[in-house]
Image (cartoon, rainbow, N blue to C red):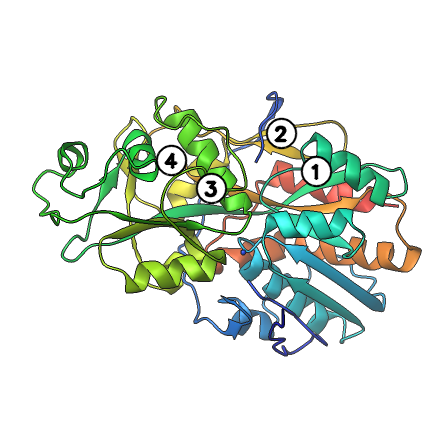
């Protein structure tokens, strides 16, 4: 499979061919400060997925002084989550600009499942995943890391939009239960009484509902299913997985979903906010029991602050709160992890991984992600991530 490799200022090569698990709660994160209004720049086609971050990244807008950089030379290959593609391309390009092109970092956004598989197989230096490693994946990763554990480092936080294409419907309200029933095929028409009851006064089309889903293994899919399982009042019965458990027609990666919704009337799906905004797709409001909540930066911030840190030491798995969220909190979220070897990598690659990920976790870089449809990590979590990055050896 060939993928385009756009050239950015301050970086030899950036490759972006754009595609959660829970545990026992531990320490509560501090609430994120209000996130600034988000504006997404135009997409630049790269392989199979667009990359809204390219323009900002080329200008080196990320964290000019947020991290003390060693700027080692070398090359890193990484792969995985499409959800973070826009953020990591910005960080890669800006890091290259800050370091005068001394290193080459390539990231192929092929989906979380592919990223983990190729990381555990020793084909890439780190992986991006929208779900922390499960036990089987962690065992394979430890083997790849020469007997040392791999760490899950949360790096990019962002919401998932329920996107739709309905003529004349500017506002659509859904609950987790109704969304589950649409995605499992129980609700088949837009005029179903359950949808109509949530949208009084809205003229819904008397048409069948077309559902699209991610056909590739995706951490975004798993996060959506986590949300439906935990908040859907029993309407979603399957165990959350990177592979879609509902009905519909599969589309490859985030770009495939955005394109399908944009061109198909009476359709609905899920996609990361940055793609929804850039493609100008209509986004449903979610009523999680405390009234409809629009997907906005401020409402995302309220929900991210309710995340729980789980795991031991520098393995920073998160548990997101999907049900019983506070009023005004947008509950459909994901966090992308960078999956790294805690030790056991080549010394030169280790130095470059630590320098780049430290830069990506810096306050200035995290803040720069806001304009591309992401929320910066809460200060407490960001500090933990920075500490873990420094501990890689």
The circle drawn on residue 220 is none
If you read the primary sequence from the N terminus, does the residue marked by circle 2 or circle 4 appear first?
A: 2
Is 173 on the left-hand or right-hand side of 158?
A: left
Q: Are marks 2 and 1 in contact (CB under 8 Å)?
A: yes
User: Which quadrant would the N terminus be assigned to in this image?
Assistant: bottom right
The circle drawn on residue 384 is 1
Q: Is residue 132 visible?
A: yes
Which residue was labeled with disc 2?
Answer: 309
**102 vs 316: above or below:** below
Secondary structure at badge 3 equals loop
If you read the primary sequence from the N terminus, does the residue marked by circle 1 or circle 3 appear first?
A: 3
The circle drawn on residue 244 is 3
Which residue was labeled with disc 4?
Answer: 329
Secondary structure at badge 2 equals strand
If you read the primary sequence from the N terminus, does the residue marked by circle 2 or circle 1 appear first?
A: 2
**276 vs 182: above or below:** below
Q: Position of residue 300 (x, y in %)?
A: 42, 42
Q: Position of residue 181 (x, y in %)?
A: 30, 33
If you read the primary sequence from the N terminus, does the residue marked by circle 3 or circle 2 appear first?
A: 3
CA–CA distance in space, label 3 to label 2: 26 Å
What residue is at 85 percent from the left and 69 percent from the top?
73
**Residue 303 occupies quadrant:** top left
Secondary structure at badge 1 equals helix
Q: Are marks 2 and 4 in contact (CB under 8 Å)?
A: no
CA–CA distance in space, label 1 to label 3: 32 Å
Secondary structure at badge 4 equals loop
If you read the primary sequence from the N terminus, does the residue marked by circle 4 or circle 1 appear first?
A: 4
């Amino acid at each position: 499979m060939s993928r385009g490799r756009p050239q950015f200022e301050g970086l030899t090569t950036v490759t972006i061919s754009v595609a959660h698990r829970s545990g026992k709660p531990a320490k509560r994160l501090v609430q994120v400060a209000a996130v600034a209004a988000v504006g997404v720049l135009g997409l630049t086609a790269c392989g199979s997925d667009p990359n809204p971050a390219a323009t900002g990244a080329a200008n080196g807008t990320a964290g000019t002084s947020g991290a003390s950089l060693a700027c080692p030379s070398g090359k890193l290959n990484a792969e995985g989550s499409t959800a973070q593609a826009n953020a990591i391309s910005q960080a890669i390009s800006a890091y290259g600009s800050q370091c005068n092109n001394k290193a080459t970092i390539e990231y192929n956004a092929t989906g979380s499942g592919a990223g983990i598989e190729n990381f555990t197989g020793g084909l890439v230096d780190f992986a991006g995943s929208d779900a922390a490693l499960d036990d089987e994946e962690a065992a394979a990763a430890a083997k790849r890391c020469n007997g040392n554990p791999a760490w899950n480092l949360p790096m990019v936080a962002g919401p998932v939009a329920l996107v739709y294409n309905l003529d004349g419907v500017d506002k659509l309200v859904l609950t987790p239960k109704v969304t589950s029933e649409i995605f499992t095929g129980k609700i088949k028409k837009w005029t179903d009484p359950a949808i109509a009851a949530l949208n009084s006064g809205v003229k819904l089309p008397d048409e069948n509902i077309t559902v699209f889903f991610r056909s590739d293994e995706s951490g975004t899919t798993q996060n959506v299913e986590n949300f439906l399982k935990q908040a859907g009042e029993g309407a979603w019965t399957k165990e959350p997985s990177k592979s879609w458990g509902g009905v519909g027609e599969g589309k490859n990666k985030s770009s495939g979903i955005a394109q399908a919704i944009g061109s198909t009337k009476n359709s609905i799906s899920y996609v990361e906010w940055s793609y929804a905004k850039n493609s100008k797709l209509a986004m449903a409001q979610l009523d999680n029991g405390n009234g409809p909540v629009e997907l906005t930066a401020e409402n995302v911030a309220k929900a991210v602050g309710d995340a729980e840190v789980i795991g031991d030491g520098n393995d920073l798995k998160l548990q997101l709160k999907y049900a019983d969220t506070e009023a005004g909190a947008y509950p459909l979220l994901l966090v992308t992890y960078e999956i790294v070897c805690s030790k056991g990598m080549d010394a030169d690659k280790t130095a470059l991984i630590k320098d780049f990920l430290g830069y990506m976790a810096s306050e200035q870089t995290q803040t720069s992600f806001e304009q591309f449809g992401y929320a910066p990590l809460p200060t407490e979590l960001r500090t933990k991530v920075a500490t873990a990055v420094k501990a890689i050896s």
